[in-house]
């Protein structure tokens, strides 16, 4: 059984300001995405940046066999949302953008405007597998990409850059806290007996504070002496598959020439102990993922074929 997550990068039909400009470019994008998904052959694939639900249907129409989809009803301001492609019909168990009630609204810009919900919703589904039910939650946390008043992507000065970097971090931390709250509900203190995966574009690397929020109590990470030792944290802890990804493939995006792993699969105790392999790009590929380097202006790649992210995947014993 293979599970994966992939940011599809601006999946819109032609006509949107964010997607392909014409039918030819759209078909090239869909074909590039479909070829990768077919090669992955996942039982369940979490997806991000679905801007048009019809475009996701166009994509699945290019795939062999029967596919089912589920999409969050909480898109962001430009219409992108998270979802799933699955071989078995997914049952939605949660679709929410709510932040924990205990958190104050989060400042988002110099005007003092605040956010009271996640920018994009979190979607959780359950699907049947040979090993029993699998529950998965997909997310797309606030990007490190900084936007400034007036639609600018460059700051007026370094003070503005620092402030807007802080605002983005505030939002991503709040969203990570909300996603962790959802994970707590899905685990229900029974991670040793439940297959739960939290996956998606977390927009930060393994050791980032926002990623670490999602893992729960520290200890027993893959590759440490405590991994095979049971402890009280096993019931609620999540394990990042990153250490099982070969070092030369341990990136899912290239930002200004720097490789970074910002897309993750986080596993419950029962699931992580059936993990047999993990990677980015395509299983069995001899070379690391071939990705374009992106910069501070997202308008450079509207409608480009494929995606600026590599899929991240994990394989399990049934």
Image (tube, helix red, strand yellow):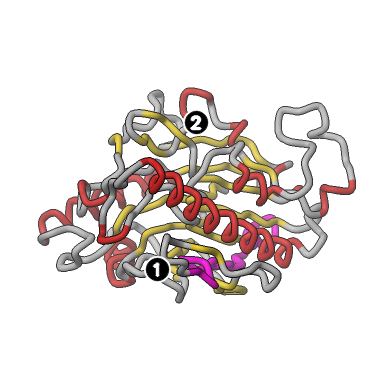
**In front here: 232 or 168?**
168
Instruction: Indicate yes or no whether the magenta region holds residue 302.
Output: no
Crowd tier of the residue under label 1, counting other residues whose Cα lies within 10 Å: few below 14, some 14–19, many 20 or above? some
**In front here: 112 or 196?**
112
Q: Position of residue 132 (x, y in %)?
A: 70, 60
**In front here: 56 or 147?**
147
Horizontally, residue 122 falls left or right of residue 159, namely: right
284 in relation to 109, above or below: above
At x 45%, y 34%, the residue is 260
Residue wearing tag 2: 250
Q: Position of residue 123 (x, y in %)?
A: 54, 68
At x 73%, y 41%, the residue is 273
Crowd tier of the residue under label 2, counting other residues whose Cα lies within 10 Å: few below 14, some 14–19, many 20 or above? many
Q: Position of residue 274 (x, y in %)?
A: 70, 42
At x 33%, y 33%, the residue is 256
Q: Earlier in the sequence, mark 1 or mark 2?
A: 1
Residue wearing tag 1: 76
Instruction: Inspect this view and state whether residue 89 appears.
Output: no
Horizontally, residue 252 falls left or right of residue 298, namely: right
Magenta stretch, main secondary structure, is strand
Q: Which mark is residue 91?
A: none
Q: Are marks 1 and 2 in contact (CB under 8 Å)?
A: no
* Label 1 vs label 2, nearer the camera: 1
Mark 1 and mark 2: span between their CA atoms? 28 Å
At x 79%, y 36%, the residue is 220
Q: Secondary structure at mark 2?
A: loop
Instruction: Inspect this view and state whether residue 184 appears.
Output: yes
The magenta stretch is: 114-135
Q: Secondary structure at mark 1?
A: loop
């Amino acid at each position: 059984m293979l599970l994966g997550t992939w940011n599809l990068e601006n999946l819109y039909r032609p006509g949107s300001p964010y997607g392909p400009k014409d039918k030819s470019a759209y078909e090239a994008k869909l074909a590039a995405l479909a070829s990768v998904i077919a090669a992955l052959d996942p039982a369940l694939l979490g997806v991000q940046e679905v801007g048009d639900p019809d475009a996701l249907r166009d994509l699945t129409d290019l795939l062999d066999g029967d596919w089912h989809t589920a999409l969050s009803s909480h898109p962001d301001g430009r219409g992108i949302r998270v979802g799933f492609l699955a071989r078995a019909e997914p049952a939605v168990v949660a679709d929410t953008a709510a932040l924990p009630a205990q958190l104050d609204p989060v400042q988002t810009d110099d005007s003092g405007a605040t956010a009271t919900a996640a920018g994009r919703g979190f979607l959780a589904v359950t699907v049947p597998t040979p090993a029993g039910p699998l529950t998965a939650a997909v997310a797309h946390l606030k990007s490190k990409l900084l936007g400034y008043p007036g639609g600018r992507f460059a700051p007026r000065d370094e003070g503005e850059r620092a402030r807007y970097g802080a605002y983005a971090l505030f939002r991503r931390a709040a969203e990570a806290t909300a996603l962790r709250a959802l994970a707590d509900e899905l685990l229900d203190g029974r991670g040793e007996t439940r297959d739960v995966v939290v996956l998606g574009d977390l927009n930060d690397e393994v050791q980032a504070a926002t990623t670490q929020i999602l893992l729960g109590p520290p200890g027993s990470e893959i590759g440490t002496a405590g991994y095979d030792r049971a402890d009280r944290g096993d019931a609620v802890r999540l394990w990042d598959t990153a250490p099982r990804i070969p070092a030369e493939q341990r990136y899912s995006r290239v930002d200004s020439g720097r490789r970074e792993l910002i897309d993750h699969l986080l596993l419950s105790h029962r699931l992580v102990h059936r993990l047999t392999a993990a990677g980015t790009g395509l299983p069995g590929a001899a070379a690391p993922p071939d990705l374009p380097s992106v910069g501070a202006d997202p308008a450079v790649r509207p409608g480009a074929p494929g995606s600026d992210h590599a899929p991240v995947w994990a394989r399990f014993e049934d």
